[in-house]
Image (cartoon, grey):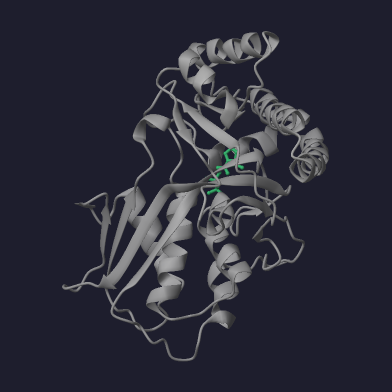
Amino acid sequence: MLKLSKMDVVGPYLPQTLQPGERGEAFAPSNIALCKYWGKRDTGLNLPINASLSVSLAHLGSKTTITPATGAEDQVCLNGDLLAADSRFATKVVDFVDLFRGDLNQPLRIETHNNIPTAAGLASSASGFAALMLALDDFYQLKLEPPVLSAFARMGSGSASRSVFEGFVEWQMGHRDDGMDSHAFQLSARWPGLRIGLVKVATGEKKVDSRAGMQRTVESAHLYQSWPLQAAADLEKLHQAILAQDFALLGETAEQNALSMHATMIASWPPLLYWQPDSVAAMHKVWQLRAEGLALYFTMDAGPNLKLLFEAEDQAAIEQQFPDLEVVNPFPAG
Ligand code: 2P0
């Protein structure tokens, strides 16, 4: 069967005549998955093999502004710097914008600011593509519904589908060829006492990015066959944990889910091990503290850094153990 292109998918949702405004602006939060997205059934549209569930990081994320460019070329800026047109980031941004600007060919200035602490080693593609999608919706006055915005953000980067929403967010995998049922939605439950601590182990570009890493895993790890079953079971447990506000169940499930994902990476060929010695040392520290009675768990993504999960009442004790911890409250009041 012929695969649909991103342009095929977006086309029907655009008006006959685009009405660009003076300015489009949006913020989107970064997110941390408690049940991970790992593996695609369609690499062009970023359609996942499993559903995932995340928590958005409130004020930490990306802000994107779109205005008409003054010259004849697009201008892409990141954190105040104008990027070379052929840089990786600028090319990805312009390719995504091209899906929406139709025949107008109006050159745009696209400015992105990330307020994610660089020390945290968090990926910015999730919040970046979500903010870009929301800013495009604002600039062209598309007035797309949230599920559509999420499905389109997903075509920029899978995890961006979740960054369109705040709080707990589930990305349903969907089954359609055009992927329009593969979008995220916000869960109504909140957890005001939940805290996420960002532990810096290492910064800098990783050698194998998530996109290449998950593809390698799908193609070469026999162990990957068990991943969709693990993810489905964990998703169910997370729903139970959130409903009952059962922190031990939430923490155990998130930690086991992350380690199961890493097991499939390690079982790939060539092997994919994102952990550094300091990552393993931090894991042992978490397990030791837990053995001593602290309700502390971790999750990890495609990198060496740990994200700690704990509750507000334990924050002081945990900050004592991890002095450089950046603590996020994902459910701020108001
Ligand atoms: C997640 N990760 O659920 C998982 C866990 C990394 C490990 O989503 O190829 O940058 O752009 O769809 O979204 C990172 O993958 O990959 C990611 P693409 P993306 O958070």
**Please, is residue 2 above or below residue 251 in the view?**
below
Q: Residue at x 19, y 74 (%)?
A: 72
Asked whether residue 73 appears in the rendered view, the answer is yes
Q: What residue is shown at x 52% (from left), y 50% (from top)?
A: 333
- In this orientation, which residue lies closer to the viewer: 219 or 297? 297
Residue placed most toward the observer, 68 or 97:
68
What is the x, y in percent for residue 3?
A: 66, 65
Query: Where is residue 268, by image quadrant?
Result: top right
- Give above or below for 43 relative to 69: above
Please identify the quadrant where the N terminus is shown.
bottom right
Residue 131 shown left or right of residue 236 in the figure: left
x, y percent for residue 220: 69, 32
Q: Please report the residue visible at 56 percent of the width from the left and 34 percent of the height from the top.
A: 195
**Residue at the far left in the pictured view:** 71
Above or below residue 21? Residue 303 is above
All told, the count of numbered labels is 0
Q: Nearer the viewer, residue 200 or 49?
A: 200
Q: Quadrant of residue 106?
A: bottom left
Q: Is residue 215 visible?
A: no
Query: Whereabouts is ligand 1, in terms of quadrant?
Result: top right
- x and y, in percent, of residue 199 in the image: 47, 24
Question: Where is residue 169 drawn, in percent x and y?
Answer: 64, 52
Against 221, is 49 above or below? below
260 relative position to 161: left or right = right
